Amino acid sequence: MTNTKFTLGLDDFRQVRARIAPHIKHTPLLTSRQLSERSGYDVRLKAEMFQRVGSYKIRGPLNKFALMPDDHAQGVALAARIHGVRAVVCMAANATPSKIAATRGYGAEVVLHGTIWDEANEKAKELVRTEGLTYVHPFDDEQLIAGQGTLGLEIVQDWPEVDVVVVPIGGGGLISGVSMAVKSHNPRARVIGVESSDGPAMKRSIEAGRLETIDCRTIIDGLRVRRVGEATFSVVQRFVDDIVTLPDRDIFDAMIWVMERCKLVVEGAAAAPVAALLHGLVKLPEGSRVAAACPGTDRRGFWYSRCCAPTLLGPAMHARGAAGSMLPGDYCWLDDPRRYCFADGIARQEMAPDFFQPSLNNQVFG
Ligand SMILES: Cc1ncc(COP(=O)(O)O)c(C=O)c1O
């Protein structure tokens, strides 16, 4: 039974941070002049793409496993390996292939089921019943939320004066932990969530005042949830100030913007806070100190970004303009290397020419 008044404070997060410290990195909070100029705020990016497994998702499972005698998938897989536990991870069959491969690479058995997290979750529950496995929820779990919240603790430790923290929402685990950490540091600091308007499960539930199951159409896998959790819903109701939404298309464009301008490779979900800032959805007094959580990357983004140097743009990439052969979240460069399209098949604007200078790419990708 979920405790709907579940609340954690800074001391709890400090304890959890100490527990998981041997296995995680304290990721940097990077200044972004371009994002600051565009938004009118002092913006810093919590660069969690440099975390082990490429995202915050190692934090929660590590805490959970440390307390049990046992993108979430990769976090569970690595945490299980560290703690010497067998892990079976259920993922949607259309999950990002690099995430599936990485999860297997960390030693987990991967079961592919359904086309969205909610369906994979039903399979996980079935395996728990039939094989006697222990269930680890990817967002609606108090110990998991406590672990994910250590990302918020690091933000307030590195920038105690922060006014606002902007966080993407899928099932709500990350923002639950982060919001409690930030508010217990400074109750006047604001926490703003970002969802895709193509699948705003948390916003709908908050507006309705009860958990709602939505028709979720976003193709951004980190944000693709039909129904958020009971605990996460309760925490967001009490600790999150606002939730803003914008379409997949704008979030994907922000993903490219972050790669181009900040030289950071993020996955779609992780670009959502930047997208909200670029589109003026976060309304604050000028000069406000804003931390945007960029909680993850995936290898596919890294690989495509390497292809941005014109010399590396092979004919195969040029030819792949057809949306039909692409997976959710996929994007490819069109025949003109400055134009690209995502899985929706719609061509995007030209990129700034300096993005294609090999020297710039070399600085970032080595
Ligand atoms: C990079 C990234 N950010 C944010 C989220 C959303 O996290 P949560 O489901 O805890 O809300 C996800 C979920 O997979 C993600 O992959």
Image (cartoon, grey):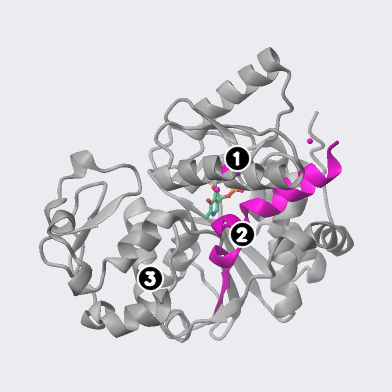
The residue located at (83%, 38%) in the rendering is 68
Please identify the dominant SS of the magenta region.
Answer: helix
Is residue 85 at least partly visible in the picture? yes
Report which quarter residue 90 is drawn in: top right
Counting from the top left corner in percent of width and height, residue 73 is at 58, 42
Q: Dot 1 surroundings within 10 Å: few (below 14), some, or many (20 or more)?
A: some
Residue wearing tag 2: 52
Magenta range is 44-73
Residue wearing tag 1: 107
Q: Dot 3 surroundings within 10 Å: few (below 14), some, or many (20 or more)?
A: many
Left or right of 109 on screen, residue 34: left
Left or right of 200 on screen, residue 240: right
The label number, if any, that marks residue 259 in the structure image:
3
Q: CA distance from mark 1 to mark 2?
A: 15 Å
Tags 1 and 2 touching, CB below 8 Å: no
Counting from the top left corner in percent of width and height, residue 345 is at 19, 48
Q: CA distance from mark 1 to mark 3?
A: 30 Å
Q: Secondary structure at mark 2?
A: helix
Report if residue 333 lies within the magenta region: no
Q: How many marks?
A: 3
Q: CA distance from mark 2 to mark 3?
A: 20 Å
User: What amino acid is labelled 1 in the image?
Assistant: Gly
The residue located at (72%, 23%) in the rendering is 133
Quadrant of the frame with the C terminus: bottom left
